[in-house]
Image: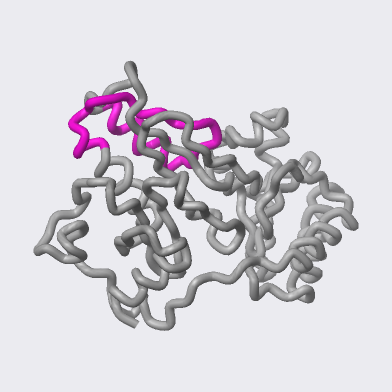
Amino acid sequence: MDYSQICTQISTHLGGNCKVILTSSGIEAVNHAIKGVAFRQKNKGAIKVEEGASLAIRNTVKWLRKNGFNEQGDVSITCMSAVDSTTGEIYNIEKSDNSIMIVDGCAAMGRIKFDMEHIDLLALQFDGFGALAFNPKIRIDPLIHGGGEQDGRRGGYIPAVLLQGFSLPLQVPLELDSFLLSQVEAFGFKINTLRNRALGIINVSLEGVSAEAVLIDLAAAGVYMSASSGCTTSTGIPDASLLRLGLTEDEALSSLRISISEDTTEGEIVEGITVLRDVVAGFQI
């Protein structure tokens, strides 16, 4: 499958009313969206970052502001995440003004459906590469300049080996998500959020146990979970999403993100949660 076929498939999946640029990653797509629009507008308005926005959004906007872009005045760009990658909470994407809406959807593929009617630019992450989908009426500057590749919107090519076998992620089945939730509840883990949660993402707190230490032992047993994406547990910085839920800093640093995909089996879920229980119990002795 070549570039144009993949772009067409992604566009069709999103409703067919958007253009698509392939990128090296979802993070590059976030950078391209925000910087591409900001540079095109030549600092004509302020950039608004919604609560719960990803670290990629926050750091990109922070860099722009550090380099002289507006913090005051009428909002011309609004940035937000579709799903909180730490807790799985789904955010309401709704345009309330005339600003350009930029959405980080990297954590949401296969978990929610996107409505491009309310989105001007959407950053996505696939297996091995990323993509930026955008309204054809929106004009953006290239982030990477080159020889006119991808209609002059991004210089260079994504290695063909990363595009081989491309397929859109399927939706995580509701039954599989319910099974994951039942297993987590059965072992008594404290679930940090259930409100408006994306399928296949659950965040749990491990009482009195360092998430970083648990992750090491889980990996040794062949089970892979993660600490919150916006939390660097090695430096002792708690995740802002968890703090907003009312967790203490210690509780946030003792929290793990459990995620599954559409091809995860019930047997793998049982095995993973069982190993997690045993590892946590070993630390609590």
- Residue 98 position, x and y percent, is 37, 31
- Residue 236 position, x and y percent, is 57, 35
Q: Which residues are magenta?
A: 38-66
| Residue 46 belongs to magenta span | yes
Q: Is residue 161 left or right of residue 269?
A: left
For image coordinates 18% across by 31% down, the residue present is 42
Q: Is residue 210 left or right of residue 105?
A: right
For image coordinates 30% across by 79% down, the residue present is 2
- Residue 36 position, x and y percent, is 25, 44
| Residue 130 belongs to magenta span | no
* Residue 23 visible to an observer of this rendering: no
Quadrant the N terminus occupies? bottom left
| Quadrant housing residue 125 | bottom left
Residue lying at the far top of the rendered structure:
72
- Between 158 and 132, the one lying in front of the other is 132
For image coordinates 82% across by 44% down, the residue present is 190
Taking 157 as reference, is 195 above or below it? above
- Between 261 and 1, the one lying in front of the other is 1
Q: Is residue 157 left or right of residue 10?
A: left
Q: Is residue 212 left or right of residue 270?
A: left
* Residue 91 visible to an observer of this rendering: yes
Taking 17 as reference, is 205 above or below it? above
Taking 275 as reference, is 27 above or below it? above
